[in-house]
Image (cartoon, rainbow, N blue to C red):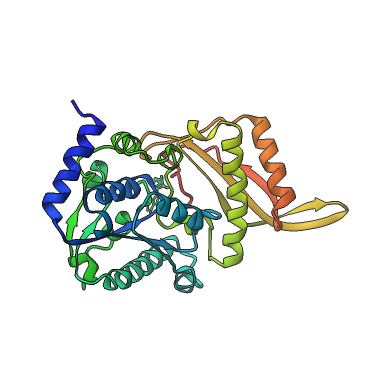
Amino acid sequence: EWTPNNFVETTVQEIKDKVGNDKVVLGLSGGVDSTVAAVLLNKAIGDNLYCVFVNNGLLRKNEFEGVLKQYEGMGLNVKGVDATDRFMKELEGLSDPELKRKAIGKAFIDVFDQESHLIENVKWLAQGTIYPDVIESVSADGGPSATIKSHHNVGGLPDFMKLKIVEPLRMIFKDEVRRAGKSMGIDPELLGRHPFPGPGLAIRILGDITPEKVAMLQEVDAIFINGLKEHGLYDSVWQAGAILLPVQSVGVMGDERTYEKAVALRAVESTDGMTADWVDLPYKFLQEISNKIINSVKGVNRVVYDISSKPPATIEWE
Ligand code: XMP
């Protein structure tokens, strides 16, 4: 029978046997998988695990600072790298969803490659790959692993990809990852976080990306997510977020006519992200969130709720 304690104990021993006194680099994403992988490796090899947490400038509001602090509090040897400008530059002028994804993937690889070169004599690359990723090679968690994998065959591999691979979670499922994380004392709030895509808010801003749009969407998203938490709805939703639409509509504020942006809210139920149903959130809640967004986020005058299921719609809009 699988138990989290047994899993942790045997996996820690396996890591020790495998990597010995070598140095290991791991990209943290803020998601469940990379975090649990890091804590396992840290238990096995301590500060020989070098974690890199990249801010692509497309995370949720205050997420980079908050999660970095949390990682430090967990005793991880972690370096936060703010590469916001780098990502913004790569994204400049791009509107096509696939080009945006590619630009983000490339920027991530460049930054990560650069960082891994700073670790002298590093021998291993650790990844938070879980069993479904092994089968599908797509992570629903938004971890760097997904980004790396989809670029495996680009040719001329970055040096960090020539490292030996250690993937302590590759035989287990998401719920087991959570249980293992819990048994190692990881904050339940972190373990219960919604999935978040690797390209982040870039695929929730339809059209081109600017720092202003990112800031606007971060505000909208924070109001929605905090509202879900305050109303005890967060844990009953599999994933939620806001989308900034490339649409302006007429509104009225006081006696003034406005012509501003529309945002969509999306909340879905799912088990693996492959199929999903929109969540029947209470009207009262939606009303409150909509008012809050329109009253406090400058530039937004309309909120709509996405009532599409997957398939045929996807969870993300891009
Ligand atoms: P879709 O939009 O395809 O999303 O229904 C299914 C799940 O995957 C997440 N997602 C991604 N995760 N990199 C990731 O790591 C990506 O490029 C990516 N695109 C979508 C999405 O958030 C949802 O959980």
Residue 283: % across, % down: 65, 31
How many numbered markers are drawn? 0
On screen, residue 161 above or below 11: below
In this orientation, which residue lies closer to the viewer: 196 or 273? Answer: 196
In terms of image quadrants, where is residue 310? top left
Q: Is 3 on the left-hand or right-hand side of 281? A: left
Q: Residue furthest right?
A: 255
Residue 245 visible to the viewer: no
Residue 163: % across, % down: 18, 64
On screen, residue 146 above or below 135: below
Q: Residue furthest top?
A: 1
User: Quick one: quadrant of the N terminus?
Assistant: top left
Identify the residue at image location x=56%, y=51%. 243
Residue 211: % across, % down: 57, 66
Identify the residue at image location x=77%, y=52%. 251
In this orientation, which residue lies closer to the viewer: 53 or 292? Answer: 53
Residue 108 visible to the viewer: yes
Residue 82: % across, % down: 46, 67
Identify the residue at image location x=29%, y=70%. 113
